[in-house]
Image (tube, rainbow, N blue to C red):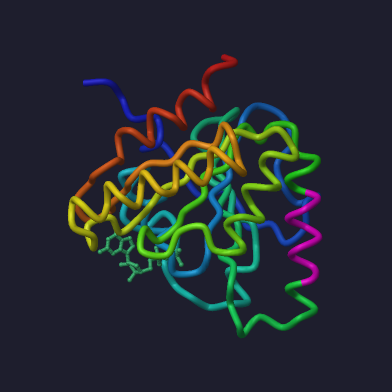
Amino acid sequence: MQKNPFREASYLLNAHRLDQLPPDAGAEIAFAGRSNAGKSTALNKICDQTGLARTSKTPGRTQQLVVFLLDEAHRLIDLPGYGYAKVPDKLRDHWRATLDAYLRTRESLKGIVLVMDARHPLREFDRMMLDFARATGRDSLCLLTKADKLSRGEAARTLHAVRKELASFAPGAQAQLFSSLSGNGVDEARGVLSKWLFAAD
Ligand code: GDP
């Protein structure tokens, strides 16, 4: 069986500012999503580890970029969950600016994984992230999580509808079903991420 490079992921640091990130070399992938979409659970599942990304919901603490190392040259970045009503305006403004600067300037960023609850896809923030990705020439992969909560028919219809919308406003963006509970879509996601991370090696 092929080795899963994501199993090697280990926590490196939390960055409140971009200058606290590791040097902009090698390759990294950022995970974004609305709070509670299932981002931490998806990260843990992809990395085959239970406690890597924290699923705790303390707003202050989660307003940071969390860096995980796969090896010296490859990283996963957990972006702050979006949509927290409790985050003070000032912190939210700081974050919008930081996120914007990160996406515009980070050369080692090879792609963005956008985690969306399959029952509520393509909300306002999701569309903003996809716009960012397109505008800055980044690849993106939409994971429609908690797919286990939909019937097969509903899941297939959702995937079809999301792909259709993406084709019109975010061409090139990929979408797939994902369930941390059943494992559906996990290998598929690893495949896309591996290509982004290791293609240039
Ligand atoms: P985050 O805020 O986006 O990091 O969301 P979490 O990963 O903490 O997940 C939010 C809630 O959704 C938790 O209660 C998870 O157990 C649940 N959850 C996450 N992924 C799945 C999934 O694939 N299926 C189901 N049924 N629940 C999930």
Observer-nearest residue: 164 or 199? 164
Does the magenta stretch mainly form a helix, a strand or a loop? helix
Q: Residue at x 75, y 51 (%)?
A: 20
Q: Is residue 25 above or below residue 141?
A: above
Q: Is residue 57 above or below residue 140?
A: below
Q: Residue at x 79, y 71 (%)?
A: 93
Image position, residue 37 (x, y; %): 43, 64
All told, the count of numbered labels is: 0
200 relative position to 176: left or right: right
Image position, residue 11 (x, y; %): 51, 50
Q: Is residue 89 above or below residue 106?
A: below
149 relative position to 9: left or right: left
Observer-nearest residue: 9 or 149? 149
Image position, residue 120 (x, y; %): 42, 65
Q: Please identify the quadrant where the N terminus is shown.
A: top left
Q: Magenta span covers which residues?
A: 93-101
Q: Quadrant of residue 197?
A: top right
Observer-nearest residue: 21 or 99? 99
Q: Residue at x 81, y 60 (%)?
A: 97
Please tell me whether residue 40 belongs to the stretch shown in magenta.
Answer: no
Ligand 1's quadrant: bottom left
Q: Quadrant of residue 76?
A: top right
Q: Residue at x 71, y 33 (%)?
A: 137
Image position, residue 36 (x, y; %): 44, 69
Q: Please identify the quadrant where the C terminus is shown.
A: top right
